[in-house]
Image: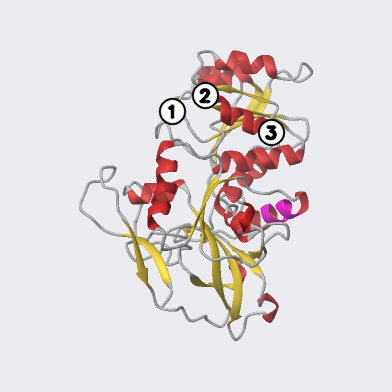
Amino acid sequence: MPKAITIQKTEGKPGQVYYPLSLKDVPTPTPGPHDLFITLHAAALNHRDFFLRQHLYPSPSFEVPLLADGAGIVTSVGSAASKSWLGKKVLLVPGRGWKDSPDGPESPEGYGILGGTTTCELGTAQEVICVHEDEVEEVPSHLSSVEAAALPLVGLTGWRALVTKSGNAEAGRNLLITGIGGGVALAVLQFAVAIGMNVYVTSGGKDKIDKAVELGAKGGVSYKTDGWEKELRKMLPKDRPRLDTIIDGAGGNIVSKATRLLRPGGVIVQYGMTVGPKMDWSMAAVLSNLELRGSTMGSRKEFRDMVAFVQEKKLTPVISRVVRGLDNLKDINELFEDMRNGTQFGKLVIEIAQDGSGNSSKL
């Protein structure tokens, strides 16, 4: 029988409990008429998986496999599905219930994300999976399955934040990305550099700033330094001395910093608030006509557009570490510890099976 990883229920309060991982046998799924039967080659972690283990994410499931990111090969198709999918490497769309509206999910039931909750029955921490043929995209031709699995959730989130929400995804515009090193921040960096934007970053460590510069950032500052916004302003181009937009996943005091950095009418796009669930909005921001825009993952259309951009620009997701084997719970737990400690620079990936491309060995 195929294997899958779920979380195992133990007693404890949210935020204090840490559900252990459990490797279990699961029934082989049967494809429906329009389904694809996919042998998964790789799956990747996101912060929501770490939050699920702490019961800090809604509706945890102890039956649904973990993880939302996955890539594999189509090994059979349902009776009404296109036979052209057979043998193709595919990426799974990580969400359900959001087709193409720029405003938000259309589904009255709300948005469902793959992996580890009762709101969606699918997860990618398993050996095989069946999904509707409309819920996959072909893997960009230059990517291995391990690289492809690092793309879906963070790529979609970053694409929506930058391209759909910021209104500033244009060559020559100035962008600040906070907390470089996480998957979404790095996806935004790669997209923005490919567009031709002037990208600046913040981080708590110089090594991450240096790596971001290697990826095309113009410079960066440590958010641990008092007055870092003054240091950053000195780096901005003389002919465009203010930021146009900030893509932020931390929250905290970003608004007070933004009033000193953004041009009038500048935009803060918020996709997360890891520092705290609330932050202050100031009169100085109002007087500067700044805008704060919340942003979540994204629609099916945005996912398609993002994958096409990755193919066109030949972008390769940044990977921090790969462990091999779904039964390798010791090393998979260490990936979660990387996330807990914030030591990763890029995505944390499980290689479930080699894709035969010969590319995974380089990671």
Which marked residue is nearer to the observer: mark 1 or mark 3? 3
Residue drawn 47% across and 30% down? 251
* Contact between labelled residues 3 and 1, with CB atoms less than 8 Å apart: no
Residue found at x 58% / y 17%: 229
In this orientation, which residue lies closer to the viewer: 7 or 239? 7
**Magenta: main secondary structure:** helix
Q: Amino acid at mark 3?
A: Glu
Q: Which mark is residue 181?
A: none
Residue under label 3: 214
Extreme residue toward the bottom, this view: 79
Compared with residue 115, is residue 14 higher up or lower down, i.e. above or below? above
Mark closest to the chain's N terminus, 1 or 2: 2
* Spatial CA span between label 1 and label 3: 32 Å
Give the vertical position of 145 relative to 84 (above or below): above
Give how far apart the Cα atoms at labels 3 and 2 are: 28 Å
Specify the segment rendered in magenta. Answer: 306-311
Decide which of tag 1 and tag 3 comes sooner along the chain: 3
Label 2 SS: helix
In this image, 11 relative to 146: left or right? left
Single out the residue that lies furthest toward the left: 11
